[in-house]
Amino acid sequence: MSILKLLGRELMEEGWRRFVILAIISGLSGAVVLATINLAATSMRDVDVMVNSLIILIIAIVLYVYSQKSLMVMAALLAEQTVHGLRVRLLRTLKAAELIEIEGLSRNEIFSCINSEMRVISDGATSMMIIAQSVVLTAVTMVYLAMLSLVALLMAVVFIGIAAYIHLSRNRQIIDEHERLFQLNTEMMNGFGDFIDGFKEVKLNTARSEELTVRVGTQSAVVSSRQLEMQNLFSVNFVASQVTFFLLTGMMVFVLPLFGSVEPPTLVKITATTLFLIGPISAVVGGLPAVQRMNAAADAILALQGKLSEIKRWSPTGQAAISEFAWIGLAGATFRYPAPEGENAFMVGPIDMRIDRGQVVFITGGNGSGKSTLLKMITSLYLPTSGAVALDGRPMQGNDVVAYRNLFSAIFSDNHLFKEFYGIPPVDPKAAAGYLELMEVARKVTIVGRSFSTLALSSGQRKRLAMIVALLEDRPIYVFDEWAADQDPYFRKKFYREILPMLKSKGKTVIAVTHDERYFDAADIRFHMEEGGLQRVSASAGPDGNAPPAEH
Ligand SMILES: Nc1ncnc2c1ncn2[C@@H]1O[C@H](COP(=O)(O)OP(=O)(O)OP(=O)(O)O)[C@@H](O)[C@H]1O
Ligand SMILES: [Mg+2]
């Protein structure tokens, strides 16, 4: 069971032992309560028996209270530890995952994993403990029943066996139903996501708005009706198990005497015992759906973890930063996007490329020619399918990649602007103010502590803030993917004529994707891309006076 696997990760061996002992004490004390009451009820006249029974009863109840409470607290603690552990592990897995894996994931799958699936586990743990305790209680009560009458035990076992069979035969159905429900739920969430993310497009087009509303509404109805079907399965199961007990108790009174002489007091004890069994067995039957839900949730969580852990990863710990280098490049590097079987995946390369430290490099090419993909290869965000990324001619492998990535500060066309300055060295307020002036946003934004005062800006202005972040990061290599495309002509000129030369004068390397023909002269070298292939277009001497080798 996946859920045991998940919970087991948090529960050490000692924890299991404590858990089993508590479940046994709790189950046993419950059964002792029944036996003592039965004994006392049939020994009304014997004062000694009555007094002893009362003392045992009180001890049993105290033990029951203590063990049951500890069990529940332990369950809640275990569930919270597990869920916290899962969140941390998921965070760690996300941290270690590669871009290409994250791009292949549904955002809603991750969110629903963190939200609903983990809540199921958090809420269901108590059910698991009640089940464990009830199983013990049932077993002990059965032993007691056997002591009263073997035939009664046999009848009880047969009846409960039938009920269990009915229940288990529906189990598979319920589990399948839950998995399907999870998928449907994710689809519905995608619909809501479309609504929010595409709100402008939806608002401007009534027909689109209608169609999307109908689609999401239908999905919601399907989710509800599936949920109802599942609840139906549960209730049929529940009613069936209750009826089994009514029948069983009736049988004890009407049929048991036919199998031989049973003393009336024993018959009363047997009936009381059968009625007593309703509690724990109902707890098991009633709690199983929660466990099944937990199990399905655990499956979903493990599946997500599995998807995230297919590629080998590197841990960034203990990695020395690269301080000196003369050039970076690609050596016969190719990158192919994953594609469904039978479909042609887009491929970039093979590419040989050399970029010297301090150079300003432009990459041009038509839409879809592979420029952004190439930037992700150069920054090593996409690991090459074949060939290698190299630093001073040395291929970057394993842990090198982590240090290599930290050479770059990049602004991709779909960059994410963090309000907080995560991972940026302590900000010198004077330098920061200077950058705000340079990017001409000082009237709109200030830097408060380690964050921007606001991000409520135009898209061009947000790109300028991203530039400030990049400048504050102060890495040796800058990567810009059509940064100037969002800027007005005045600022575009400033980018090519002021900012790039400023970076160059600081010895920074710049790799920029651009469509701005009038500024092509701002580059030391320009590469042109076509259908994933790269060609060097123009060259000027490198910063050290040596022309880099010709590339294709
Ligand atoms: N996430 C992806 N999964 C699969 N294929 C992709 C993905 N992103 C891009 N591609 C493929 O790679 C090709 C190149 O995309 P890329 O984004 O590198 O182009 P580009 O040159 O940057 O274009 P643009 O000028 O429009 O930004 C696309 O035509 C597409 O076939
Ligand atoms: Mg692009």
Image: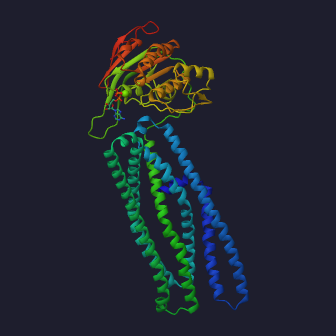
- Residue 452 percent coordinates (x, y): 56, 30
- Is 118 or 159 nearer to us in this picture? 118
- Is 10 or 413 nearer to us in this picture? 413
Quarter location, residue 515: top left
| Rendered residue at 39%/44% (across/down) | 194
**Way the structure is coloured:** rainbow
Q: In screen coordinates, is 254 left or right of 39?
A: left
Tell me if I can see residue 13 in this picture. Answer: yes
- Residue 173 percent coordinates (x, y): 38, 63
Tell me if I can see residue 328 in this picture. Answer: no
Indicate whether 205 appears above or below 17. above
Total count of labels: 0
- Is 190 or 118 nearer to us in this picture? 190
Q: In screen coordinates, is 510 left or right of 370?
A: right
- Residue 158 percent coordinates (x, y): 45, 78
Q: Which quarter shows the C terminus?
A: top left
Ligand 2 quadrant assignment: top left
| Rendered residue at 53%/18% (across/down) | 438
Quarter location, residue 344: top left
Q: Residue furthest left?
A: 342
- Residue 45 percent coordinates (x, y): 69, 92
